[in-house]
Amino acid sequence: MAKDQEFQFQIQVEAGDLWKFSMYHANKGYLGIFNVLFTLASLYLLITKWGSTGAGYRLLLLMCVLMFSVWQPGLLFLKAAKQAKNERLKVPVTMTFHREGFSVVQGDQSMDVTWDQVGKVAGIKGEYILYMGRIHAYLLPDRAMGEGKEQFAGFLREVLPKERLKRV
């Protein structure tokens, strides 16, 4: 890679981006495994016990099946849609990545970040998440990267150690 190569992306975070981020966190690791197993077990019981149980038990099992497969994603989307209406998120963010780190500009505010301040970069379907810590992250949607996504992924693999990259 050329020493002076840089990538610049104009980012407008939308409700769908926030929803993917929320779904990723709500269903990763052991919690995600539990959600899937709970839903499958509830579905199994609902199907196998349908004829031998009363309406109350069927309703309870149906609620258990829908809890992590419909309600949780729906509630997370409503929350993301509400967050996306926040005035701060309506102002586009310009991120410029270079060998030393990256800069973030939103409106009249700007910040420079070095690569050692980045805890991890995770790739999920449709976006990269740049974690600065446990509660601070930047979302970089695929639509902002466009055709340069593969080049940018290669750039990230060069500037960050492998242990700080997940699905990049």
Image: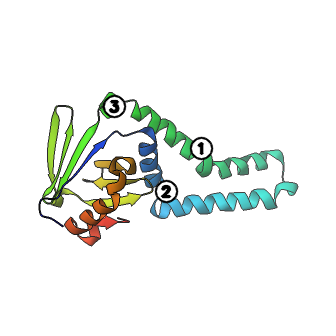
Q: Position of residue 160 (x, y in %)?
A: 22, 66
- Mark nearer the viewer, 1 or 3: 3
Mark number for residue 90? 3
Q: State the CA–CA distance, disc 1 to disc 3.
A: 27 Å
Q: Earlier in the sequence, mark 2 or mark 3?
A: 2
Residue beneath disc 2? 27
Q: Label 3: how many residues lie within 10 Å, few (<14), some (14-19) or many (20+)?
A: few
- SS label for mark 3: helix
Image quadrant in which you'd find residue 110: top left
Image quadrant in which you'd find residue 46: bottom right
| Residue reaching furthest to the right | 51
Q: State the CA–CA distance, disc 2 to disc 3.
A: 27 Å
> Which residue type does callout 2 highlight?
Asn
Task: Give the side of residue 44 with respect to residue 66, left or right.
Answer: right
Task: Give the side of residue 22 with respect to residue 48, left or right.
Answer: left
> Which residue type does callout 3 highlight?
Lys
Q: State the CA–CA distance, disc 2 to disc 1.
A: 13 Å
Which residue is drawn at the image coordinates 31% and 42% (left, top)? 11
Which residue is drawn at the image coordinates 50% and 36% (left, top)? 78
Residue beneath disc 1? 71
> Which residue type does callout 1 highlight?
Trp
